[in-house]
Image (tube, rainbow, N blue to C red):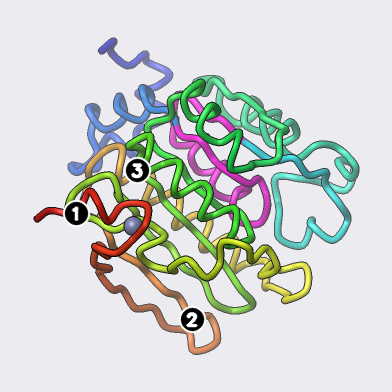
């Protein structure tokens, strides 16, 4: 792996002085490719922190355009961006934030048919899913298990946020489907369009998602496989649980350790 330039030693100095990250962790970040699904309330802060952290390659998928009602919680975008594609606008923001990051914008809508070829083409090390409905999250999770790619899933609703690290391709770790089951396969209506959400909650949960992607890349701290963190913004309070692999899961159950 090539050594860090003087500018990089300066830019990432506050990472490098962390014993748990160090120069090796920073090089791992610069060599990593994270695919962010959804450049909305969760994707915006996640992309912002992943780009600033020097993740060397970012792919951003979103088929939507920026609307006025997005701006309350999607601070990569400004009033002048209304009507522009989210993925491309987010990619332009990344280019402005950090020249170390090679960024690609993908403006396709995720479907069960295109996600597998998309992962095969782009070959990310980690997928960070910040989409706003169960159907897409399950499609993304199933494809990650098949492609053996770790998934950080981050979701919000009103005052609650959830972040989980899913490694369903491993014999002892759950996938997202082990957690939510099959009932949501046709359920695309838990969006914040009708629910409402506090903008700052998106910042918190999206940054948390970026944190867990960075943990997966650099290996700092404790093992997060199968951990789900639930934040209650009303109290406020947070708790963490370790989810089991479901041997009956139709996506990853067959991979369970005997
Ligand atoms: Zn599973």
Image position of 232 (left or right of 43): left
User: Disc 3 marks which residue?
Assistant: 150
Above or below, 122 against 83 in this view is above
User: Disc 1 marks which residue?
Assistant: 256
Q: What residue do we see at 48% from left, 39% from top? A: 50
Mark-to-mark CA distance, 2 and 3: 25 Å
Image position of 11 (left or right of 9): right
Q: Which comes sooner in the sequence, label 2 or label 1?
A: 2
Mark-to-mark CA distance, 3 and 1: 16 Å
Foreground residue, 155 or 121?
Answer: 121
Eye-nearest disc, 3 or 1: 1
What percent of the width, then of the height, locates residue 51? 52, 34
Above or below, 208 against 98 in this view is below
Q: Is residue 52 magenta?
A: yes
Element assignment for label 2: strand
User: Disc 2 marks which residue?
Assistant: 232
Q: Quadrant where the C terminus lies?
A: bottom left
Q: Is mark 3 within 8 Å of ligand 1?
A: no
Tell me where residue 4 sits by quadrant. top left
Q: Is mark 1 within 8 Å of ligand 1?
A: no
């Amino acid at each position: 792996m090539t050594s860090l330039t003087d500018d990089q030693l300066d830019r990432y100095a506050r990472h490098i002085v962390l014993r748990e990250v160090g120069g090796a962790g920073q090089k791992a970040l610069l060599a990593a490719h994270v695919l962010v699904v959804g450049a909305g309330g969760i994707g915006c802060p996640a992309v912002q922190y992943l780009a600033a952290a020097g993740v060397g390659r970012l792919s951003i998928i979103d088929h939507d355009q920026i609307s006025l009602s997005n701006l309350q919680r999607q601070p990569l975008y400004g009033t002048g961006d209304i009507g522009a594609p989210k993925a491309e606008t987010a990619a332009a923001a990344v280019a402005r934030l950090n020249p170390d990051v090679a960024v690609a914008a993908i403006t396709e809508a995720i479907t069960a048919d295109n996600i597998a070829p998309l992962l095969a083409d782009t070959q990310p090390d980690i997928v960070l899913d910040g989409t706003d409905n169960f159907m897409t999250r399950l499609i993304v999770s199933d494809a990650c298990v098949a492609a053996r790619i770790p998934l950080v899933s981050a979701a919000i609703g009103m005052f609650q946020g959830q972040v989980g690290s899913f490694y369903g391709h491993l014999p002892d770790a759950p996938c997202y489907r082990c957690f939510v089951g099959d009932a949501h396969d046709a359920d695309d209506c838990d969006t914040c369009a009708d629910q409402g959400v506090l903008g700052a909650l998106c910042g918190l949960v999206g940054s948390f998602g970026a944190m867990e992607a960075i943990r997966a890349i650099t290996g700092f701290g404790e093992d997060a496989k199968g951990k789900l963190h639930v934040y209650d913004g009303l109290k406020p309070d947070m708790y963490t649980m370790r989810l089991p692999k479901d041997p009956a899961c139709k996506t990853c159950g067959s991979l369970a350790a005997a």
